[in-house]
Amino acid sequence: MGVEDNTAGTVTADAGPAAAEEVTTLAAGTVVYPIAPGYRVNVRRGPGTQYGIVRTLPYGMSVPVYCQKPGERVSGPYGTSNLWDNIANGQFVSDAYVKTGSDGYIAPRCD
């Protein structure tokens, strides 16, 4: 997934505050991962840019990854990947824009 415009893309690249570089754990034990610094990432209804945009994450956001699902292959600041991270019910972002520290699965596969 490359950098794309807001109408069809997954992210918009702009200069913005850097995202946290560390993986964080929430009080409930949920691990969150930072979105690439300088990117506002579109959250989609499914694992590809053909799915509708639910919302756009602000700069500096970190997200939980509950499960992962293969989908459209995209390129981003963390490589090229076909993995999509489920960050909430029915909400996916490309793993190429999430600093998970791995090119593979870091969470269970989504059903």
Image: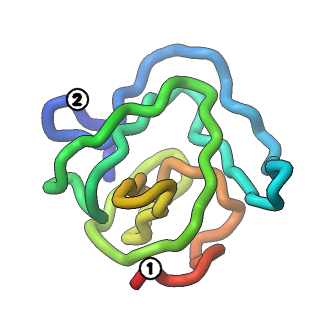
The residues bearing labels 2 and 1 have C-alpha atoms spaced at a distance of 26 Å
Percent across and percent down for residue 5 are 22, 29
Percent across and percent down for residue 102 are 66, 69
Q: Name the quadrant of the C terminus.
A: bottom left
Residue at x-position 81% and y-position 57% = 28
- Relative to residue 109, is residue 87 depicted above or below? above
Residue under pointer 1: 110
- Relative to residue 89, is residue 27 depicted above or below? above
Viewer-closest of 80 and 84 = 84
Q: To which quarter of the image does residue 60 belong?
A: top right
Q: Which SS class for mark 1?
A: loop
N-terminal label among 2 and 1? 2
Residue at x-position 46% and y-position 32% = 57
Give, as a three-letter code, the residue at label 1. Cys
On residue 6, the disc is 2
Give, as a three-letter code, the residue at label 2. Asn
Disc tally is 2
